[in-house]
Image (cartoon, rainbow, N blue to C red):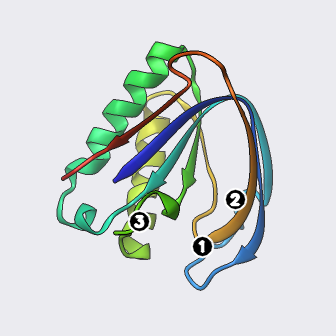
């Protein structure tokens, strides 16, 4: 799993086009905007299907950074573009949903951008030393 963390003054996205693996938007947001959000861009990789600990490791890293920043508002953003070894869509959706549910149970306000949709997004990153970071998580 590849993860890019960006602490944003402002983050917004608009869904533009459904792909063949897109999830329904019934409970999702077609156009969302957030202020002072910690955005977590996630790419699920092929190797992630072999190990269930990628979710717990990602939760641990996300919580550690959120505590350092003093933020409670998180946005999970499926982002296939961080790797050339992307995992199967069904595995990725399952992992992202598990991340979403577990972070909510830890008391975070969590939004999740819809999986499988082309999206236009805009962000303004905060300008401090912890505003941007990335990690690779292996099972």
User: Separation of disc 3 and disc 2 at Cα?
Assistant: 17 Å
Q: Which residue position is annotated with label 2?
A: 28
In what element is the residue under mark 2?
loop
Q: Which residue position is annotated with label 1?
A: 23
Percent x, y of residue 122: 76, 46
The reply to whether discs 2 and 1 touch (Cβ–Cβ < 8 Å) is: yes
Q: Taking 34 as reference, is 109 left or right? A: left
Which residue lies at the image location 31% right of the left edge and 48% below the top edge? 55
- Dot 2 or dot 1: first in sequence order is 1
Quarter of the figure with residue 17? bottom right
Query: Dot 2, crowdedness within 10 Å: few (<14), some or many (≥20)?
Result: some
Foreground disc of the pair 3, 1: 3
- Dot 3 or dot 2: first in sequence order is 2
Q: Is residue 114 above or below residue 2?
A: below
The reply to whether discs 3 and 1 touch (Cβ–Cβ < 8 Å) is: no
In the displayed image of the protein, which residue is found farthest to the bottom?
Answer: 20
In what element is the residue under mark 1?
loop
Q: Taking 36 as reference, is 105 left or right? A: left
Which residue lies at the image location 69% right of the left edge and 59% below the top edge? 28
In what element is the residue under mark 3?
helix
Which residue lies at the image location 35% right of the left edge and 32% below the top edge? 61
Q: Which residue position is annotated with label 3?
A: 92
Which residue lies at the image location 29% right of the left edge and 69% below the top edge? 46
Rendered image: mark on residue 51: none
């Amino acid at each position: 799993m590849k993860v890019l963390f960006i602490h944003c003054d402002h983050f917004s996205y608009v869904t533009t086009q459904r792909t063949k693996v897109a999830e329904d938007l019934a409970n999702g947001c077609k156009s969302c905007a957030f202020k002072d959000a910690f955005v977590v861009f996630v790419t699920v990789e092929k190797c992630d299907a072999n190990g269930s600990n990628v979710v717990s490791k990602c939760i641990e890293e996300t919580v550690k950074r959120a505590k350092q920043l003093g933020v409670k508002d998180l946005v999970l953003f499926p982002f296939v573009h961080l790797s050339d070894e992307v995992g199967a869509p069904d595995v990725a959706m399952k992992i992202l949903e598990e991340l979403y549910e577990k972070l909510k149970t830890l008391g975070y306000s969590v939004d999740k951008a819809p999986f499988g949709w082309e999206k236009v997004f805009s962000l303004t990153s905060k300008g401090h030393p912890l505003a941007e970071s990335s990690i690779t998580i292996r099972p």
